[in-house]
Amino acid sequence: MVEGHAGARAAVAWLDASGGRVRWWRALRRTPPAMIGAAVVGGVVIVAAAAPLLAWNNPVAQIAKPLLAPGGPYLAGTDQLGRDELSRLVFGTRVSLYVGVLAVLVALALGGTAGLLAGFYGGWLDNVTMRAMDVLFALPALVLAIAITAVLGPSLTNVMLAIGIVYAPTFARVARGPTLTVAQLPYIEAARAVGVSTPAIMLRHVVPNISAPLLVQTTVSLSTAILTEAALSFLGLGTQPPTPSWGLMLSDARQYMLIDPWIAVLPGCAIAITVLGFNLLGDGLRDLLDPRLRLL
Amino acid sequence: MRYLLRRGLWTVAALLGVSVVIFLLVHLIPGTIVDILGGGEGQLSPEQRAAVMHQFGLDRPLPVQYAYWLGSIAQGNFGWSFRSGQPVGQLLVSRLPITMELAVLSVAGVAGVGIPLGILASVSGSLRVKTAVQVIGLLGLSLPNFWIAVLLIIAASYLFHWLPALIYVPPWTQPWVNLQQMFLPVLSLALGLAAVVVRMTRSSMLEVLGQEYVKVAQAKGVTRAGVLLRHALRNALIPIITVLGLQMGYLLGGVVITEQIFGLPGLGWMLLNGVYQRDYPVVQATVMLFALTFIVVNLAVDLVYTYLDPRIRYG
Amino acid sequence: MARSDSDARGRLSRRMFLGGGLALGGLAALETLGRGWHPAPAWAAGAPKRGGTLVAAQEVDPVSLDPHTNSNFSALQGYEHVYESLTMYDQKMNVVPCLAQKWDITNGGKTYTFHLRPNVKFHNGQPVTADDVKYSIDRVLDPKTASPWISWLSAIKETKVVDPLTVQMNLDAPYPDLLGSFAGLRASGIMPKGFAERENLKIKAIGTGPFKLVEYVPQDHITYVRNGDYWNQPLPYLDGMTFKVLTEENARLAALRAGQIQYAALSAQGAAQLQNAAGITVLKAPNAWVSLHYINVSKKPLDDARVRRALRMAVDTGEVIQKAAYGAAVPSGPIPTGYGDWSLDPRTLPYLKADVDGARKLLAEAGYPNGGFTVEMSCSPQYPEFVASTLVVQESLRRLNVTANVVQMEWGAFVAAHNRELQTGGKEGGVIFASANTFRPGPDGYIYPYFATKGTLNDGGYRNPKLDPLMTEARAISNHDQRRSLYVQIQRTLLEESPNWWWYAKYNIEALSTKLQGYAQSFTGRRIFLKTAWLGA
C-alpha cells in the first residue's frame, strides 16, 4: 500500500518536472472533475485487466445458494442463480469496456471517416454523405439497434456493431466541422499546389484538428454505449446470459428489488461510477482542449 | 425561400432513404406475423401458413411489396396493422399526442432546470459550486433510463403509496389527472437528459462570456443580469437550442422504454411492439413519422438560429 | 437395463423427496392434490353484491381477440370473458354444461348430440341457435381460417343442424377429450353466424359471455361491461372490468400497493416483493403450466435416448424449481402435476435429485465417456423463468463435460426458429427450445401431438413404435381407469426416453385486493371465475 502511494507520488512528480511537453498535465490537475474522471476510468481499466486476479470465482458458475447477502466467502453476496456477485461485478468491467470500445471503434471508422471526407472534399460529396448520416440519425436509435441485432443474430458483438452504426452520425458531425474550417485555409491549397499527397495533407493538417473533439466525443460515447447496452439488456437484446454485464445484472435484479436489494444496488453503482467517470473525463478534456485548440 | 425549398427537397430524399432502410431492415428480421399469430404452442400446417402469408401480401417479392407500400403512402394510405387490422394512420393519430406531450414536457422540464443550473455553473466563482452542479447533473445521466423509471415507480408506491390513474386521459379531458400521469415519466426522462443541457449551457456561456463584446457591455455599465440575459445568453443559446432540438428528436424516437414501463400508449411503445410482432405497416409508418418529425424539428432549430444570430443566413 | 434403473430410482426417490428441502413449497401443494383439484379457500364474508368496476392488470398484450385464429395465451385472457362454448369448467375442473344444456353421446362415442340452452342471447341481442354453433365450428375447421388450435376439434368430421336448438357432430373416431376441448375455449368460442365476415374480429367481439367487450385499445387496455342478459343469472356481479396492460411487474406491484388495481397475476418473486402489504391477498394454486425443454431428437448425439436421459439426470429438479420459479412450483412429468389423476405423483418422478455419477455412466455406455460434445439451447427473455432454467441446465451439464451454448433470442425470432425446426423435421432451426405447455383439454393434448409419429408438433421426428399404438388407443377409449393406466405407462416410458425434459408445474399466483371477493383460481390458469366475483367494502 505504502509503495503504491509512493509510486503514485513519484509519477506525479515526474510529470510535473517534465516541463512544457506536459502542460496539459498541469491543466488537468487544475480541473478536479477531470482528475476524478481520469482516476475512475483508470481504475476501471485496471480492474478489467486484472480481473482474474481480483475475482476468485468463475463469474458464470452457480456455486452457492442464491441471494446470499454480502459477507462470508462471497464478499458481495450471490445473485439469483447462486453466482458470486463480486466476480460478476469485476468481470463486468471487461464487458463494459468491450462494449464501449467496440461501439466507438465502429462509430469512428464509419462516422469519423465519413465526416472527414465530407468536410475535406466538400460540395456534392459533403451533401450526400451528410444526408446519408441524417437518414441514420433520423431513425430511432433503439429500433435501429434492435432491427440490426435481430438481422445479424443475438450476440454482444453484433449488438455493439449496431450501436456503433447508430453513433456514427454524431462522429461524422463532430469530424466534419473542424475539417471544413481547415480545408479552406490557404496553406492547404498551397500544400496541394506544391504536390503534397492528399492522404499526407489529411494526416498532417486535418487530423490533429479533429482529434481533440473526437477524443471528447469518444469518452462521451463510451459512457452512453454502456447505458445503451443496459437498455438493450432490459429488452432482452443485449448481453447473452450468463455473461456478466452490469446492464444485464441490473435488468435481472428488477424482480428481486425488495427481496435482495444488493444485486440491484451494486451493478447500479458500478454503472453509475463508470459512466460518471467517463463523463467527467470527457468534460475535463473538452474544457482543456477545446478553448485552447481554437488558438492553435 | 429558396433555402426552404432546397431543404424540403433534401427532406424528401432523406425520407425516401429512411423508408428503404427501415423496409429492408424490418423484412430481414427473422420471423413474420404468421409466426407470432400461429407460433408459441399452436401450430399451422404449411398450407395454412401459405394462406395467411398470402393474406398479408408477404409472399410477393420484396421490391414489389416496397413499391406497393410507397405508392399507397403517397396517396395517404398507411395500410392496416397486421395485428389489429386497424388503419395505421388512425393508430398514428391517436398515439402521437401522447408521445408529443411526453417529449414537450420533458424538454420543457429539462430546459427549465438545466439552463439555470448551467448558467449558475458558468458564472459562479466557487469551484465547489461548479463541481457540485456538474456531478449532480451527471448523476442523472449516469444511470440507465429503465432503472430510473423503475426506482421512481417503487419509490412512489412504496414510500408515498401513490400512483396515478392507469388509463391514459388526454390533457384536454382531465388536465390534472393527465399531469399526474405524466409526472413520473417526465421526471425519469428529464433526469437523464438534464446533464447534457447543463453541460452545454455552462460551456456555451463560458465561451460567450469570454468574448469581447461582453466586456464592452460590462464597461458600458450594463448590469450583471443585463449582460447575462441580453448579451450572453442570446448568443449562448445557439448550441443549447441545438441540443434541445436533438433531445426532442431523441425523445420522439427513443422513449420506448419509458412508455413501456409506465404503460403509456405512445408511438414508441407501439413501434417497439410492432418490431416484436413483425407488424410491418406499423413499423414502417411510425419510423417515417419519427424521421419526418426529427427533420422538421432540426429545420425549426436552424430557423431559430437565424433569429438568434443575424449573422447566420442561409442562401 | 431399464428395470434396474427404475429400481434404483424407486429406492432413491423417497429419500430424495423427504430430504428435499427445496421441494418444501411443493410439499404443501401436494397435500392438497390427489384425485381432483381443490379450489382456493373461500374467505368471502357476506353475500355477493352487485356493482363496482374492477381495475386489473394484464401482463401481456392480447395481440388479437379473435377466438379462433391466434395461439397466444394472452389472447385467451382477453376474450375468455366475452365468448363461451358448449361446455365449460367448474371450480373442480369438471366439464359442465354451458351453452349446451345437455348432450348425448352415441354410436360408440362417434356421435355427439348437443341440446342447446334455450333463450340465450348474444351481446347484440340476437338469440343463439344451432346455426351459430355450426358456423363457429366450421370456421375453426376451415383450413383458410388457419386456426393454430385446429387439432383440438379436428376429430369432428361433420357438424349438422338438427333443429334450431340441437346440433349433431360426427367424429371419425371416438375422442373423449372433445367436451374438454370445448370448455378449454382455445378454438371453440361461439359467435353469431357470419360475424367474421362482417367485423374485424381482432378488436371486436360478440359472444354470450358474462361480460361484453366495450373497447380494446391494442397494447393499452381492454374494457368490459356487465352482460345484463347473461343466461347464468344472477352472474356476473361486477358492473364492469378494465384490464390495463402493464408488462413491467414492478409497475403491477406498485399499482396494487397504491390501490389503483384490485387484481394482478404475479410471479413468485413479485408476490415475495409484496411482503404482506396491507389490503392485498395472494392466492396460490397449482396450474397447468409445465416448464420444459423441447428436444430436436434428430440431432446427434441427442438422437440417443441414453444421452438425453443422462443429461437430464445431471440436473437437479429442485434446483431448477428454486432458481427458475423461486420455489413456487411442483416437479412434473409430461402431464402437469395436479391434473386430476392423469398426472404422475410427483413423489414418484425420476430425476428429482441430480445423479451425476449415474449420468456419467450412462454417457459412457452411449459412447461419450467424457462428454465432450456441444448442444445448443435456445430461450427467450420473454419468459425469464425459462432463461433461468436453461442456465441451470447449462451449469449442470458442465459437470459432465458437456458444453451447452445458451442462445437467447427475441420472442419472434425464437418462435420462428422453433417453427422452422418443426417444419423441416429438425434439419434447421435449433436443437433445444425452452418453453412450456399450458392447459390442454385432456391428457392427450400433452402426448399425441408431440410424440406420435404422425404428431404435428413432433420435434425432430421422435418415433417410438411401441408407444404409437398406445397413444392412439388412449386418445379414443372412454373407460377412465383403462385410459389412466395407459397414460401412466406412456408417461413413464416418455420420462425414460426423455424426448423432452420436463421440469415443473408452476403455481398460479394471483394477488387480489381484499375488496375483491368470491374469486376462485382455476387450474387452467385462466380468470374464469371473475364472473363470480364481487367488490365488497
Image: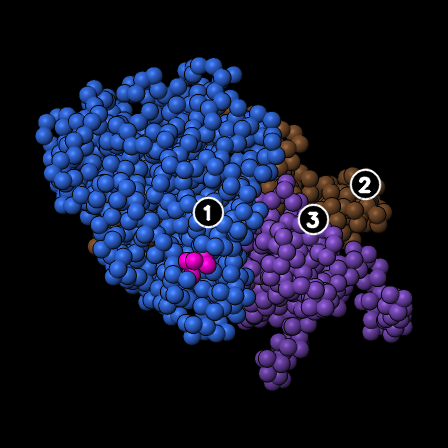
Residue located beneath label 2 in the image: B224
Relative side of C341 to B143, left or right: left
Q: Secondary structure at mark 3?
A: loop
Q: Position of residue B310 (x, y in %)?
A: 63, 49
Instruction: Please name which of the two marks, 1 or 3, marks the residue nearer to the observer.
Output: 1
Would residue C6 be counted in the magenta stretch?
A: yes
Chain B tint in image: brown
Would residue C319 be counted in the magenta stretch?
A: no
Q: CA distance from mark 1 to mark 2?
A: 83 Å
Q: What stretch of residues is rendered in magenta?
A: C5-9
Using the image as rendered, state which of residue C370 and residue A159 is in the foreground.
Answer: C370
Residue located beneath label 1 in the image: C347
Q: Position of residue B248 (x, y in %)?
A: 56, 46
Instruction: Please name which of the two marks, 1 or 2, marks the residue nearer to the observer.
Output: 1
Colouring scheme applied when the structure was drawn: by chain
Q: Position of residue B237 (x, y in %)?
A: 66, 47
Q: Judging from the image, what is the letter of the chain drawn in purple?
A: A
Chain C tint in image: blue
- Chain to which mark 3 belongs: A
Q: Which mark is residue A69?
A: 3
Task: Determine the residue positioned at 16% across, 31% down.
Answer: C104
Looking at the picture, which amino acid does disc 2 mark? Answer: Arg
Looking at the picture, which amino acid does disc 1 mark? Answer: Arg
Q: CA distance from mark 1 to mark 3?
A: 32 Å
